[in-house]
Amino acid sequence: MSPTTIVMPPPPGGSRITSRIDAVTRIPLTHLAAVPPPPRSVKIELTSQCNYRCGFCAHRLRLKKRGEMDWTLYTRLVGEMVDAGVEELGLFFIGESFMCPWLADAIAFAKGRGIRYAFLTTNGSLATPERVSACLDAGLDSLKFSINNSDVAQFRQVAQVKGQLFYDSLANLKAARRVRDEGGYSCGLYASSIRYDGKQQEQMQALVSEILPYVDEHYWLPLYSMGSLAKEREEELGYRPTAGNQGRLEALREPLPCWSLFTEGHITYDGKLSACCFDAGDRWIMADLTKIPFAEGWNSAPFTKLREAHLKRDVAGTICEDCVAYK
C-alpha cells in the first residue's frame, strides 16, 4: 500500500484541510514581493510548553525560555490581525496548546473578533473529550492530530516520554470523533503522519488504517529538518529529513523562495514575529510585536531584506543560510 493522502467525504465544516494547507504553501503572485500584503493565515503560540521531547523537533533543545502568552497581548494581536485582513488563525506554533488552560477562551475570542477559521494541531495526549468539547463549543473549525509513531516502542524512543501517552493520544482521537458527531459540531477532524522508510513505513500504514474511520482526512508529511536545528538527534535516530518545509508530501513546493516568509505569520508566546515555521529558538525573529503592531512587523526592514534574498534565490549571508534546504 503506497503512502498517499486518504480522501474521505467532505467534513461537516466544508473544505478539506489539504486544500487549505496547499493554499498557504503556494505563494500567490499578490504575495510574491518583498513587501507583500498581510497574510491570510497566522499561527500564534499560546504556550511554548510541550509534554513530548520528540527527536525530530528542535523544541526539545530548550533554545529559549519557555512560557505562556499574556492574555492582553493575545487579544490585542488578534484584533490587529483581523483588522489587517487575517482570516485564518492557528492557535499553536512550536508548543502543545492543550497545555494552555485558556485554550477554549482563546478560540472563542478569536472567532468573536472576526477570525473566520480557527485551527489547531495537537499531539493528542492531552486532548481529552472534555477539553475537545470545550474547544468545539468555542467555535474551533479544525482539529488535527499528529500521529507520527507506529507503536509504543517507537513512541518511547522518539518522544522520550512514558508509553501511556501513546495510547492516550489514540483514545483521545477516537473520542473526539464521538464528541464531534454527538454534539453536531461542524469542526473538521484530521490526522497527519510522517512518512518514513521501509519497514517503519509499513508499520505506520497499519496504525493509519486503524484511525481512518475516525477522521475526515489523513495526509502524509515528509520528515522536516526544523531549520537544521535538530540535525544531531536526527542522525542518531537514522532520520533523513527533507529540505526546509516544502509542504505536505503530495504537494511539495520549491524550497526557495520559502512560503513561510510570504503567506503565513508565526508569532511566539512572547510576541515575536518569526519568518520561520520551525523557529524554536528565536533565530528568525523579524519584529517584536510587543512594541509595534502586527501589520508594521509583517513588513519590517529585516523581513523585507530577507524576502528580497529569497526572491533572488540566494540566501547566502542570511539567517536562512544554514538551513539544510539550501545546502
Image (cartoon, rainbow, N blue to C red):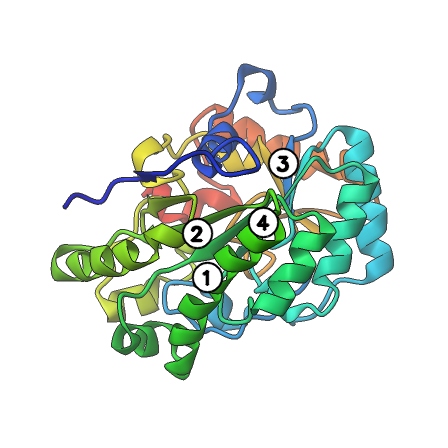
Question: Residue tagged by mark 3?
Answer: 41
Q: Is residue 254 above or below residue 243?
A: above
Q: Is 77 on the left-hand or right-hand side of 184?
A: right
Categorize mark 4 by other alpha carbons within 10 Å: few (<14), some (14-19), many (20+): many
Query: How far across and how far down the image is residue 130, in percent?
Result: 63, 68
Q: Which mark is residue 284?
A: 4
Inter-mark Cα distance, 1 to 3: 25 Å
At 69% from the left edge and 61% from the top edge, which residue is drawn? 134
Name the residue type under label 4.
Trp
Inter-mark Cα distance, 4 to 2: 10 Å
Question: Residue tagged by mark 1?
Answer: 173
Instruction: Pick the quarter of the image with the C terminus.
Output: top left
Inter-mark Cα distance, 4 to 3: 18 Å
Question: Residue tagged by mark 2?
Answer: 227
Q: Secondary structure at mark 2?
A: helix
Inter-mark Cα distance, 1 to 2: 29 Å
Query: How far across and how far down the image is residue 311, in percent?
Result: 50, 24
Name the residue type under label 2.
Gly
Q: Secondary structure at mark 4?
A: loop
Categorize mark 1 by other alpha carbons within 10 Å: few (<14), some (14-19), many (20+): many
Pointer 1 or 2: first along the chain: 1
Categorize mark 2 by other alpha carbons within 10 Å: few (<14), some (14-19), many (20+): many
Q: Are marks 4 and 2 in contact (CB under 8 Å)?
A: yes
Outermost bottom residue = 162
Q: Which mark is residue 296?
A: none
